[in-house]
Image: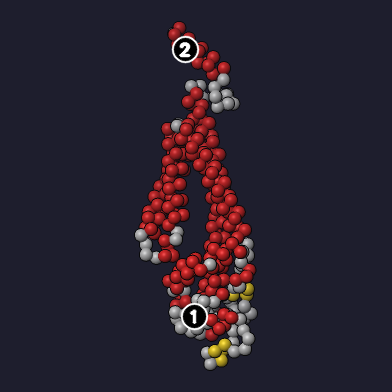
Amino acid sequence: MYHQRFSNTVIGYLNLVTLLASVPLIGGGLWLAHSSSSCQSALQTPLLALGFIVLLVSLAGFVGACFGVAWALWLYLVSILILIVALLCFTAFGFVVTAGGGGQQVPGRVYREYKLGVYSSWLKKHITDDKNWHTALVCVVGSKACNKIATYTPLDYLQHDLSPIQSGCCKPPTSCMYSGGMAVAAQDNDCYRWNNAPNILCYGCETCKAGVLEQVRRNWHKISVLNVIVLVVLIAVYAMGCCAFRNARRSDSGYPYGVNHMSKINPGWDYYWWRWWRDRREQLY
């Protein structure tokens, strides 16, 4: 009986916490839906979907564990299993598409510079195509990352690190050579795309796209590492839920705790024999 109470109580509390956590997720998704920022609105669909999935799964697990409702626990376990499989696939995919990148160290500089060709084809296709790149570029300009280094001197560039976006979008490649504000000799095409105007800079450069890809790669890699931790937690909760589901079914079968040893979901002949004997004993006494 102690194990029954313990497993059901743990599942109940875990799902109460996740149920409460779904409220800010859904609220944040609704807020993003009404936001004027194109950078934020792109996140509203996955955020809302995640919030509602967590809400429904938590409700099923909470009701099933606290009230011993076997079908609710069954629904909860199936949902958790689907989430585990989906998260496992998404995590593996995330590690694959973020395998490249990392940038190259610039001699005599603290920062790195990034090339577009080293990133995965899928990541380049879904970030740098015309439609998605316009949205990403709006985010880059709106972040005002370049404003933070607008007053940098050549000495500052020697001493300070730069984010991938600052390195790729806010300055020309370090190898570029200029004379009178014009690129000289045969150089990388990005050297000719660079313009000192605050609204142009190197936003049209390939290095800018590479910097955005590097930032996306870093963030996605962090999420993939976090997903591994979440997977471990979900598997532990799933195992605890299986225990609670078994206890709920044992309670529904009519057996006292510790008597039911059925290995199948459908009752066997011993169950009906035990019910017949119990009814006759109640009639006698």
Disc nearer the start of the sequence (2/1): 1
Image coordinates of residue 31 in percent, x first then y, are 37, 58
Can residue 22 be seen here? The reply is yes
Question: Three-letter amino acid code at disc 2?
Answer: Asp
x%, y% of residue 22?
Answer: 42, 49
Q: Is residue 179 above or below residue 47?
A: below
Figure coloring: secondary structure
In percent of the image, x 47 and y 74: which residue is there?
Answer: 145
- The answer to which of 23 and 232 lies nearer the viewer is 23
Mark 2 secondary-structure assignment: helix
The label number, if any, that marks residue 126 in the structure image = none
Q: Which mark is residue 201?
A: 1
Q: Position of residue 105 (x, y in %)?
A: 62, 75
Secondary structure state at the residue bearing disc 1: loop
Seen at 57% across and 46% down, the residue is 85
Whether residue 193 is situated above or below residue 30 in the rendered picture: below
Q: Residue furthest front?
A: 130
Residue extending farthest to the bottom is 180
Nearer-the-camera pick, 134 or 101: 134
Q: Quadrant of the C terminus?
A: top left
Q: Which is more toward the observer, 163 or 195?
A: 195
* Spot occupied by residue 213 in the image (x, y as percentages of width and height): 55, 67
Q: Which residue is mark 2?
A: 279
Q: Amino acid at mark 1?
A: Leu
Tag count: 2
In percent of the image, x 63 and y 86: which residue is there? Answer: 186
